[in-house]
Amino acid sequence: MDKNDERMHLPGEDRDWSESYYFNFVDPDKKIGLFTRMGFRINDGWADGLHVLFLVFSQFRT
């Protein structure tokens, strides 16, 4: 990998081609986690995003 891998790539010919970025984090002390994805559909001219927040409100017992 080099610094060019961190930049947007030239789109392929497929109409459904997309460039995606994922970010995740967890804080076990605060019992919180986050997953996010941003997608760029260059050939379609639009972008989308998904953001999921995980919260733990109680302890599970087994």
Image (cartoon, rainbow, N blue to C red):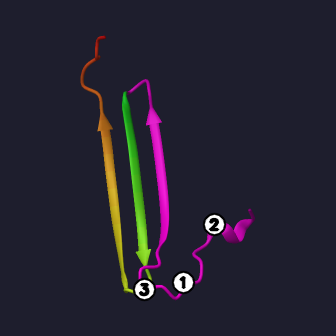
Mark identifier at residue 6: 2
Q: Residue 9, located in which quarter of the rendered image?
A: bottom right
Q: Are marks 1 and 2 in contact (CB under 8 Å)?
A: no
Mark 1: secondary structure:
loop
Is 7 colored magenta in this rendering? yes
Q: Which of the two marks, 2 or 3, is nearer to us in this view? A: 3
Question: What residue lies at 33% left-to-right and 54% top-to-bottom?
Answer: 51
Q: Are marks 3 and 1 in contact (CB under 8 Å)?
A: no
Question: What residue lies at 48% left-to-right and 57% top-to-bottom?
Answer: 22
Amino acid type assigned to the residue bearing label 2 in the image:
Glu
Q: State the residue position of label 1.
A: 11
Is 20 colored magenta in this rendering? yes
Earlier sequence position, callout 2 versus callout 3: 2
Earlier sequence position, callout 1 versus callout 2: 2
The residue at the far right in this view is 2
The residue at the far front in this view is 14
Q: State the residue position of label 3.
A: 15
The residue at the far left in this view is 57
Question: What residue lies at 44% left-to-right and 83% top-to-bottom?
Answer: 42
Quadrant for the C terminus in the image: top left
Amino acid type assigned to the residue bearing label 1 in the image:
Pro
Q: Which of the two marks, 1 or 2, is nearer to us in this view? A: 1
Estimate the x, y position of residue 40 in percent, counting from the top left. 43, 75
Amino acid type assigned to the residue bearing label 3 in the image:
Arg
- Give, as a single range, the part of the protein colored magenta: 1-30
Quadrant for the N terminus in the image: bottom right
Q: Residues within 10 Å of mark 1 (few under 14, many from 20)?
A: some
- Position above or below: 44 against 4: below
In this picture, residue 33 sits left or right of residue 1: left
